[in-house]
Structure formats: C-alpha cells, structure tokens
C-alpha cells in the first residue's frame, strides 16, 4: 500500500500521485515512520505551555520565523487565524497568525525573532501615500483634500 503524506489517504500499488493533494505517494514503511515521529513530537509538545513570540502578517513571514527558530532547536507551532467555519476566510484585523514556542524557550525565541526583524524589516504601510508623493507636478497636498 502507498499513502499520501498530506491527507493520509491510502492507495493501491501502482498509483503514484494523490488524486486530491497532487503530491507523490510514499511507501507504507515511510508513512508509519513519519506518523510515529509526529505522534512522539505531539506527545512531547502536549505537556508544554506555548506562548506567542510573533504575530505574523503572512504565511511567508510565519514560515521564515518558524524556520529560524527550528534551526536553533526551538519547537514551534504556527496557529493561523484562518477560520474553517467560513471556508478558509481569514480574520484580517488580527494578522495572518501567531508563531508560538514553549514558555521555557520564550526569551531565546524573542531574541531570535528580534534579530530576524533587523535582517528582514517589516515594510512601511504607507503604500498609497508613497505613490502620490512621487507624482510629477503634484505637491503632495492634492491627495488628502478629497473627501
């Protein structure tokens, strides 16, 4: 038997790609190894209190922070604000999601997140104003007078 590493669907021999996820299937031995590893990690992490160290504005930012923390050996959980009750809509005012680490790793993780923020500074959110200021013939005053 072969399995999809994403949705865990079981397939007969001869099928190479998951019909739903469109990813390559893996042999049963590899699937069981991954499953057991995930269970051990889940058991380890279940007993720990996780705290937020970064409010990510996008999946890309969350993955960048997660990668940096994991590289330093810190367990990481990314919790998206995606709401499955509304078919995957996001609650935009909160950002994309939280990057969380065990309480015991908080100080080290916050230092790493701070250093990462210095290397990859967050973009300024004045996108509409920046375009008006650079327009030819405009003094930058006309854009704000309109109701």
Image (spheres, rainbow, N blue to C red):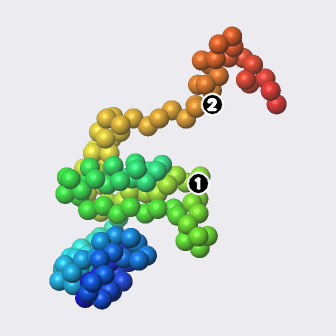
The image quadrant where one finds the N terminus is bottom left
**Contact? badges 1 and 2 (CB < 8 Å):** no
128 relative to 60, above or below? above
89 relative to 10, above or below? above
Q: Position of residue 43 (x, y in %)?
A: 26, 78
Q: Secondary structure at mark 1?
A: helix
Query: Looking at the image, which residue is at 64% across and 17% down?
Result: 135
Where residue 39 sits, quadrant-wise, is: bottom left
Q: Can you identify the residue that label 1 sits on?
A: 92
Would you say 22 lies left or right of 123 here?
left
Q: Secondary structure at mark 2?
A: helix
Query: Looking at the image, which residue is at 33% across and 50% down?
Result: 65
42 relative to 131, above or below? below
- The tag on residue 128 is 2
Where residue 75 sits, quadrant-wise, is: bottom left
Q: CA distance from mark 1 to mark 2?
A: 19 Å
Q: Position of residue 50 (x, y in %)?
A: 35, 64
């Amino acid at each position: 038997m072969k399995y999809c590493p994403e949705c865990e669907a079981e397939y007969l021999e001869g099928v190479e790609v998951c019909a739903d996820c469109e990813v390559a299937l893996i042999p049963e031995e590899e699937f069981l190894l991954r499953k057991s590893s995930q269970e051990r990690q889940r058991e380890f992490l279940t007993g720990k209190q996780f705290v937020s160290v970064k409010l990510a504005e996008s999946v890309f930012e969350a993955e960048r922070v997660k990668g940096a923390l994991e590289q330093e050996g810190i367990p990481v959980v990314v919790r998206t604000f995606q709401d499955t009750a509304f078919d995957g809509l996001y609650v935009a005012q909160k950002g994309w999601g939280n990057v969380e680490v065990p309480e015991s790793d908080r100080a080290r993780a916050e230092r790493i997140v701070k250093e990462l923020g210095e290397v990859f500074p967050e973009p300024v959110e004045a996108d509409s104003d920046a375009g008006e200021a650079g327009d030819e013939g405009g003094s930058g005053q006309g854009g704000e007078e309109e109701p």
